Amino acid sequence: MTAAHIVLTSGFSRRYTNGVKEFDIDATNVRGLLKAMDQLYPGLAEILEEETAIAIDGELHEVVYTQVLRPGCEVFFIPRIEGG
């Protein structure tokens, strides 16, 4: 397994992780990452899938479950902006 450094916005961390904004998760792809995060914070994976995009090492991605995570990468969950 490889550890990815996870970063959440202050809003998400206050609402869903009791204020924990950054942590490390062992996962080789986004699917494994979301599964591990859901074990730590039940229900979080579904919220992140529906309400965020993912930046991996500064590159923006839609939630793609097979996206590979390299050792030591930084994964930032960004709230989606909806237009009207």
Image (spheres, helix red, strand yellow):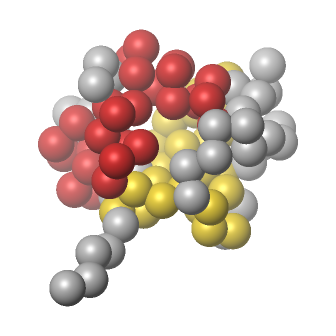
Query: Which residue is found at the position 34% from the left and 33% from the top?
Result: 46
Is residue 39 positioned above or below 53 on the image? Answer: above
Q: Quadrant of the C terminus?
A: bottom left
Front residue of 18 and 62: 62
Front residue of 22 and 39: 39
The answer to which image quadrant residue 55 occupies is bottom right
Q: Is residue 28 left or right of residue 65?
A: right
Query: Which residue is found at the position 39% from the left and 32% from the top?
Result: 45
Front residue of 8 and 35: 35
Query: Which residue is found at the position 32% from the left and 53% from the top?
Result: 51
In the rendered image, residue 36, in percent from the top left (x then y), is placed at 52, 20
Is residue 6 positioned above or below 54 on the image? Answer: above
The total number of labels drawn is 0
Q: Is residue 6 left or right of residue 57?
A: left
Q: Quadrant of the N terminus?
A: top right
Is residue 41 positioned above or below 54 on the image? Answer: above
The answer to which image quadrant residue 43 occupies is top left
In the rendered image, residue 50, in percent from the top left (x then y), is placed at 34, 47
Q: Residue furthest right?
A: 70
Query: Which residue is found at the position 41% from the left and 43% from the top?
Result: 49
The answer to which image quadrant residue 48 occupies is top left
Q: Residue furthest bottom?
A: 84
| Residue 69 in view here | no
Q: Residue furthest front?
A: 84
Is residue 59 positioned above or below 52 on the image? Answer: below
In the rendered image, residue 78, in percent from the top left (x then y), is placed at 42, 62
Q: Is residue 38 left or right of residue 36?
A: left
| Residue 24 in view here | yes
